[in-house]
Image (tube, helix red, strand yellow):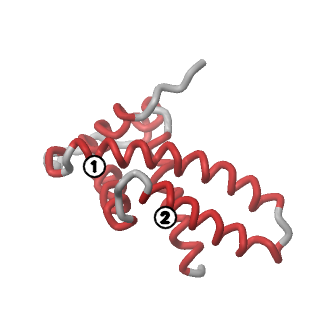
Amino acid sequence: MRPSMRTLAATLVGAACLLSAPAVIAQTQPPSTAPTKPAETIPDEKLDKAAAATVQVASLSRDYREQLAAAPPAEKQRIVDEANARIEKAITDQGLSLQEYSSIMEEARNNPDVHQKILQRLPKASN
């Protein structure tokens, strides 16, 4: 996998993990018996920014997945590069570096408290 494909894939996985329905998350995550780091290690401001970036990343991800699925092979790399640039901009426009965002997403995957704090900051889906 090319580096740009890896960046997109890692970002998409992070966003997808957080945007899954809470009920599905609860069903797929076994209860943890290991102590977790307190969520306070990530400032609320950073959690707010990560949640806002995640919404944008998820939207871009959906759009670009559709484009990739319909694209001829010769166009796929151009689409991935464009997606990576737009995703990076969505993250940095929130005031986070890619490293900060990745670290927060990793912490959210490994720490149910952080995961929950970010989920609480996501806009509720309108029905």
Badge 2 element: helix
Q: Is residue 62 left or right of residue 94?
A: right
The 10 Å Cα crowd at callout 1, few under 14, some 14 to 19, many 20 or more, is some
Disc 2 versus disc 1: nearer the observer: 1
Q: Which mark is residue 10?
A: 2
Say if 2 sits above or below 22 in the image: below
As drawn, 115 above or below 75: above
- At a point 37% along the width and 62% down the height, the residue shown is 102
Identify the residue at the far right of this view.
72
* Residue 52 horizontal side relative to residue 61, left or right: left
Q: Residue 6 at x, y = what percent?
A: 53, 73
Numbered mark located on residue 79 in the image: none
Which element type, helix, strand or loop, lies under badge 1? helix
Image-based side of 125 in relation to 76, left or right: left
Q: CA distance from mark 2 to mark 1?
A: 19 Å
Q: Nearer the viewer, residue 44 or 104?
A: 44
Amino acid at pointer 1: Lys
Residue with the mark numbered 1: 46
Q: Residue at x 59, y 81 (%)?
A: 2
Q: How many marks?
A: 2
Q: Quadrant of residue 105?
A: bottom left
- The image shows residue 27 at horizontal and vertical percentages of 43, 35
Which is more N-terminal, label 1 or label 2?
2
Q: Quadrant of residue 52?
A: top left
Residue 55 in picture, x, y percent from top left: 49, 43
